[in-house]
Amino acid sequence: MKIESNVYSSLPRLYTQNQDTNQANNELKLETGFSLPGHDSVEISDAAKRLAEGITDRQLPVGAIKHNSIRPLFTAEIDSSLKQLLSEKSPEVEEAVNFLISFNFVPDGSVSDESERATLLESGLSQAKYIADNYMIGDEATEFLTAMNKIAAYAKTRTVDPETGQASYIKIPRKPEGAPDDYIDIDYLMKKYDPESAIKITESIKDALNGGSDAGFMDILKDFNQKLAQNPQWSKDYLDETNMVDKVLNSTNINNRFNGADTSNMAVFLADMNSKFQNTAFESKDFLTRNMEYFALILGKQL
């Protein structure tokens, strides 16, 4: 299971500058609402119980275990694009997309071999191409593959702490859809530069939700607003980080050894992919063939 620290916070959103150019001193503008989640990720394997019983997914018949894949959150742009593209598709198509993201792009800690992870990711890109070619119409295919390539780029940022063995990915700054380029996540900045105020404001919100008073909430925000004005480097560093992440997601090229697989129909696709799998250096190709078979099974294709 992949556990992510995507905890929704109740801190208001903050734009770096008021959009009214006539307002003096480029005063910072607070906008009420809920901030979107961050995207620090830590992987915790869900396979331990089955391993303790001497059973692994690879030993069971394809389809014996139902993988209810939940699509992780990425950027507002990616999430919105996928949601719209998949909203009018069959549930099987959405489940197949969720599956290839969760089991090919960002598989859980049960896949520890980096070579296997890289190969699954490339296989997932080919699966995405199959969906684009067979279930998307017109510009949908291009938009879908653009989103999937960005998720694959995100997956390539995975690093493992040698001491703890925990894996993490690049932190994706979240902003509401339609927010300006200079949007600042006040939740992130407050937790990073003024954690004491972040704790106080969280406690204030909890009190209000429990029927108590939210006294002090706006005072804390105003105080932090002043701190931001006095420390412009905080906002600059945040925007620099955001631009760096955008560059990573938009410019990472992945050399897919399975590129060009025939996607004309599932039977041909499976045969072509399995043929390409034989050229990989793995002694056993089982993890790849079973992954492909389950992908086909989700889409209701006969094996």
Image (cartoon, grey):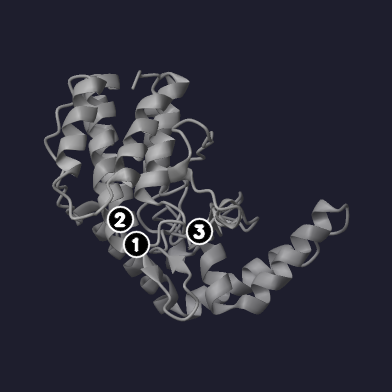
Q: How crowded is mark 3: few (under 14 residues within 10 Å), some or many (20 or more)?
A: many
Quick one: SS at disc 1? loop
Disc 2 + disc 1, Cβ < 8 Å: yes
**Secondary structure state at the residue bearing disc 2:** helix
Q: Quadrant of residue 78?
A: top left
Element type where label 3 sits in the image: loop
Front position in the image: 187 or 169: 169
> Foreground: 78 or 54?
54
Which residue sits at x=40%, y=52%?
A: 106
Q: What residue type is labelled 2?
A: Glu
Q: Which amino acid does label 3 sit on?
A: Gly
Q: Is residue 290 left or right of residue 206?
A: left
Whether residue 80 is visible here, answered yes or no, is no
Rendered image: mark on residue 116: 2
- Residue 159 lies in what quarter of the image? bottom left
For mark 1, what is the residue? Answer: 113
Q: Position of residue 39 (x, y in %)?
A: 47, 58
Measured from the top left, where is residue 256 in percent x and y? Answer: 16, 47
> Which disc number belongs to residue 280?
none
Answer above or below: position of 149 versus 293. below
